[in-house]
Amino acid sequence: MFGAGFEPGDVAVDDGAGGEVRIHAVRGGEGPPVLLLHGFPQSHVMWHRIAPELARDHTVVAADLRGYGDSGRPASGPHHAGYSFRAMAADQVALMQALGFDRFAVVGHDRGARVTHRMALDHPHRVERLALLDILPTVYVYDHVDRAVATAYYHWFFLIQPADLPERLIGCDPLYYLHRSLGSWGSGLEAHAPDALREYERVFADPAARHAMVEDYRAGASIDLEHDAASAAAGERITAPCLVLWGERGVVGKNPTSPLEVWRTVAANPTQVVGAAVADAGHFLAEENHRATLSALQAFLGDRP
């Protein structure tokens, strides 16, 4: 889906628990490196309209998070730590190092954006700049739950239930749940290219993949919040230039406080946080309005001292 200029590959990295986890990615282009990270319930395939264009001026690596796509699905371990944003961020840093990149830009959407946020805190010397697509900080969302948020983010509270309740319920009709998720967050299912949709369906048909995705959310409501609290107490902030994009029709854009202002509160230099709403888009910016999303990313990634 990415064209002849992209090559797939797998890299085995330390899983943080004494073993290894395989991370799948595609790579193409030449120039300053940029890592693309997807969200739920997708894979690196979501970047198929963006990556080839960025590859005109960058070395682009589009990777699957652990548990997603064709990456490995390690055990969760104690406290769901195996699927924490910290573990996922470490995977991707190790992937980029294995490919020869010590510093790089990162673009993350949805869960991938949360991994990107954690990466910017844990590995500030690796992250040259970051783009966060259609999210607010995890702790901010949990601290501002009202009826509207609970309704829009219902899956946050459904997927964190103890095993194997969500796995068993989703397993009754996985295709329906996948399509409902992809087609009800400010966009219709038709926003996703048929080839991409088939890839999402292929992966989501695997019970182990569904369990791993659920574990991601369980970690997000437990150990990830502990990591966020420790970072806040230590005064850790985003230090790299940051682009924030959100869908004009999506839930994030309806937040009473501008997403841009929210992210500026967790940055060391608020003036380095820029961004805007993407018109004619809900949650899935890279599919619904890839031209506007691409234009914003190109301008941000190309703005170098």
Image (cartoon, helix red, strand yellow):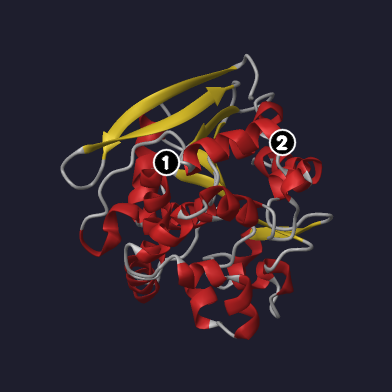
Is there a contact, CB below 8 Å, between mark 1 and mark 2?
Answer: no
Question: Looking at the picture, does residue 284 appear above or below residue 161?
Answer: above
Which residue corresponds to mark 2?
193
Judge the density around disc 2: few (<14), some (14-19), many (≥20) Cα neighbours within 10 Å.
few
Question: Looking at the picture, does residue 181 appear above or below residue 19?
Answer: below
Q: Earlier in the sequence, mark 1 or mark 2?
A: 2
Q: Residue 219, percent across and down?
A: 36, 63
Q: Residue 32, percent across and down?
A: 57, 30
Q: Nearer the viewer, mark 1 or mark 2?
A: 1
The circle drawn on residue 206 is 1
Q: Which amino acid lies under the numbered mark 2 shown in the image of this protein?
A: Ala
Q: Residue 19, percent across and down?
A: 18, 39
Quarter location, residue 60: top right
Which residue: 57% across, 73% down? 265
Which residue: 46% across, 65% down? 237
Frontmost residue, 191 versus 264 = 191
Q: CA distance from mark 1 to mark 2?
A: 21 Å
Which residue: 44% across, 43% down? 68
Which residue: 35% across, 55% down? 86
Question: Looking at the picture, does residue 56 appear above or below residue 142?
Answer: above
Q: Which amino acid lies under the numbered mark 1 shown in the image of this protein?
A: Asp
Frontmost residue, 182 versus 207 = 207
The circle drawn on residue 57 is none
Which quarter of the image is occupied by the N terminus?
Answer: top right
Frontmost residue, 124 versus 228 = 228
Residue 289 placement, left or right of 202: right
